[in-house]
């Protein structure tokens, strides 16, 4: 008699534990009907055990991806092994609202889940348990860390004055563009340009005015470039742009839009109106070009020709 009492006490102790643990516990049978539903699930779903028992889990929770979960559960029945999923693969199984004050930025609870086979005394498996872990704190902290790392990465490759790519990062992209062309032969051009008589601007109006001029040029460049173009500040008043899928004529149209826009823009500093122009050089990449350094040098040589011919113009590199 004492053994029976002991077993009953242990059973009640286990049931109390399952109800009070801070994880969700759901038991479903082979027909995906809910057989057990603990307090965690009741508190977060608003549904009492009596409301869900013998109800199909997909009927009660249509947001659950049916094909995915049935595949997981069926593999547990078949192989008699656990199955897992974490929040990075699937943010949640049950769309529960997140009420944690610390991680209140998350709309829904992030969840890890484990699906366990429930083996009877005969060795048969007729039910599985789905254990739901609330990992919102971990998920939000990791997401915030990833965002911070991305911001730091962007800062490390961004020129502070212009918000364009800095020289180091831009040159990395130039090398990649060179390699892609050698592999796929798609047209690509590089543009170099700088501000005409920029030293005179600094000497006449001051470095503050020079910075405003550089910011103005950068703004027009960003407004003109396509989403696939890669622009950067190459030096003090010198800029560079990679133009994928652009031959020499397409590159020249791009350059002329920038040149004309800058020529007609007035920058006012301390009540003084300042107008500037730019000179540009284009180098379409050809099979004869042996390196990305030479490719860039060709654009610089074309830029030099623009300056020698009177500035405020665009020149396409045509070889020696």
Image (cartoon, helix red, strand yellow):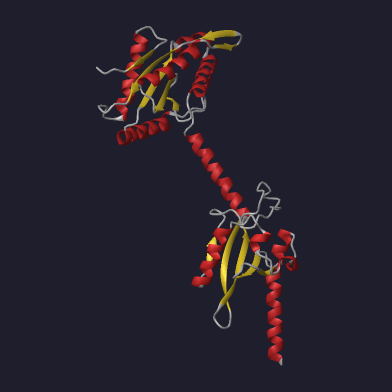
Residue at image position (53%, 12%) is 265
Looking at the picture, does residue 128 appear above or below residue 302? Answer: below
Q: Position of residue 170 (x, y in %)?
A: 41, 30
Q: Position of residue 206 (x, y in %)?
A: 52, 12
Looking at the picture, does residue 232 appear above or below residue 68? Answer: above
Residue at image position (51%, 19%) is 220
Looking at the picture, does residue 319 appear above or below residue 86? Answer: above
- Position of the N terminus by quadrant: bottom right
Q: Position of residue 236 (x, y in %)?
A: 44, 20
> Quadrant location of residue 280?
top left
Looking at the picture, does residue 225 appear above or below residue 199? Answer: below
In-front residue for pair 310/90 = 90
Residue at image position (42%, 10%) is 312
Q: Position of residue 61 (x, y in %)?
A: 66, 58
Q: Is residue 234 visible?
A: no
> Quadrant location of residue 128?
bottom right
Image side of residue 248 versus residue 22, left or right: left
């Amino acid at each position: 008699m004492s053994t029976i009492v002991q077993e009953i006490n242990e059973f009640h102790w286990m049931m109390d534990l399952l109800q009070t643990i801070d994880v969700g516990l759901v038991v479903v049978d082979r027909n995906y009907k809910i057989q057990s539903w603990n307090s965690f699930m009741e508190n977060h779903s608003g549904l009492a055990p009596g409301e869900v028992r013998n109800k199909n889990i997909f009927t009660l929770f249509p947001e659950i991806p049916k094909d995915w979960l049935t595949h997981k559960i069926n593999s547990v029945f078949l192989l008699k092994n656990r199955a897992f999923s974490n929040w990075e693969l699937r943010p949640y199984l049950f769309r529960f609202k997140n009420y944690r004050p610390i991680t209140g930025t998350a709309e829904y609870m992030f969840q890890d889940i484990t699906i366990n086979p429930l083996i009877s005394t005969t060795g048969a498996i007729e039910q599985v348990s789905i254990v739901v872990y609330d990992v919102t704190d971990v998920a939000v902290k990791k997401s915030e860390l990833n965002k911070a790392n991305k911001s730091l990465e962007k800062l490390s490759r961004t020129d502070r004055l212009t918000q364009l790519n800095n020289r180091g990062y831009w040159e990395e992209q130039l090398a990649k563009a060179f390699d892609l062309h050698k592999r796929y032969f798609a047209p690509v051009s590089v543009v170099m340009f700088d501000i005409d008589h920029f030293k005179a601007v600094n000497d006449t109006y001051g470095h503050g005015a020079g910075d405003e001029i550089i910011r103005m040029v950068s703004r027009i460049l960003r407004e003109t470039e396509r989403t696939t173009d890669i622009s950067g500040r190459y030096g003090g008043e010198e800029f560079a742009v990679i133009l994928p899928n652009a031959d020499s004529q397409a590159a020249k149209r791009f350059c002329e839009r920038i040149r004309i826009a800058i020529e007609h823009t007035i920058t006012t500093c301390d009540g003084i109106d300042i107008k500037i122009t730019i000179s540009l050089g284009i180098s379409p990449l050809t099979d004869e070009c042996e390196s990305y350094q030479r490719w860039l040098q060709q654009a610089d040589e074309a830029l030099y020709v623009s300056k020698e011919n009177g500035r405020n113009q665009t020149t396409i590199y045509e070889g020696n």
